[in-house]
């Protein structure tokens, strides 16, 4: 038992002695940078800058905080609002364009373009009558799908536009 205690004391003694020797005091300066971010440094600030001087017990714990990169920060808070305004304007323009296109397609679909015999949309029968072919119905179905796709696209754009408010 005594042997274990002696081993523990021998192992802990150097650690405790080194911990006492590293408790140096360090001076840290804190001030507000040009971009509004707080700056912490072990070197004094430039002349004319109002800085707070702090003394820390353990010099090893001093970490210098660098300024955030200027590219990641916006210089003006209004820049973000301007970007949103531009994005909303572009979305609104696209919405108006798609809305016009959709309205023209709806009118054309409702009006119902006559079957075109040259495109094989009609078939002449022996008794003088004509019959609509699959090509005519396929075209009408394609027009209806196009209208639905535009409606879905417009709904998505309006949703995105409203989220930007």
Image: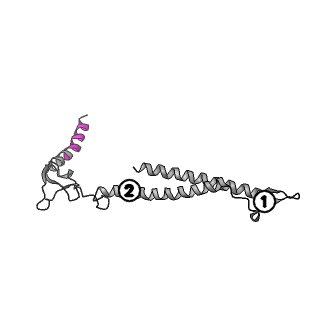
Report whether 160 appears left or right of 65: right
Q: Quadrant of the N terminus?
A: top left
Q: Which residue is at the front of the view, 74 or 47?
A: 74
Work out how far the residue at label 1 is from the one at label 2, CA to CA, in angstroms.
Answer: 52 Å
Which class describes the residues within 10 Å of circle 2: few (<14), some (14-19), or many (20+)? some
Q: Main secondary structure of the magenta part?
A: helix
Res 122 label = 1
Q: Position of residue 111 (x, y in %)?
A: 66, 55
Q: Is disc 1 placed on a helix, strand or loop?
A: strand
Q: Nearer the viewer, mark 1 or mark 2?
A: 1
What segment carries the magenta color?
1-14
Q: Position of residue 156 (x, y in %)?
A: 51, 51
Residue receiving disc 2: 85
Q: Which residue is at the front of the view, 10 or 53?
A: 53
The type of colouring in the image is one colour
Q: Is disc 2 placed on a helix, strand or loop?
A: helix
**Extreme residue in the bottom direction:** 118
Report whether 16 appears left or right of 97: left
Pointer 1 or 2: first along the chain = 2
Which residue is painted at 24% across and 40% down in the image?
A: 8
Question: Is residue 9 magenta-colored?
Answer: yes
């Amino acid at each position: 038992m005594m042997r274990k205690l002696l081993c523990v004391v021998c192992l802990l003694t150097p650690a405790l002695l080194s911990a006492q020797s590293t408790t140096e005091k360090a001076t840290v300066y804190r001030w507000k940078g040009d971009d509004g971010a707080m700056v912490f440094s072990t070197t004094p600030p430039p002349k004319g800058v109002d800085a707070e001087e702090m003394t820390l017990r353990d010099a090893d714990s001093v970490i210098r905080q660098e300024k955030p990169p200027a590219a990641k920060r916006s210089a003006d808070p209004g820049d973000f609002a301007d970007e949103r305004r531009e994005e909303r304007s572009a979305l609104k323009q696209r919405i108006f364009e798609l809305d016009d296109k959709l309205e023209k397609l709806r009118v054309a679909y409702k009006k119902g373009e006559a079957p075109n015999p040259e495109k094989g949309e009609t078939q002449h029968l022996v008794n003088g009558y004509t019959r609509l072919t699959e090509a005519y119905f396929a075209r009408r179905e394609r027009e209806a799908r196009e209208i639905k796709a535009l409606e879905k696209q417009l709904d998505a754009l309006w949703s995105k536009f409203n989220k930007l408010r």
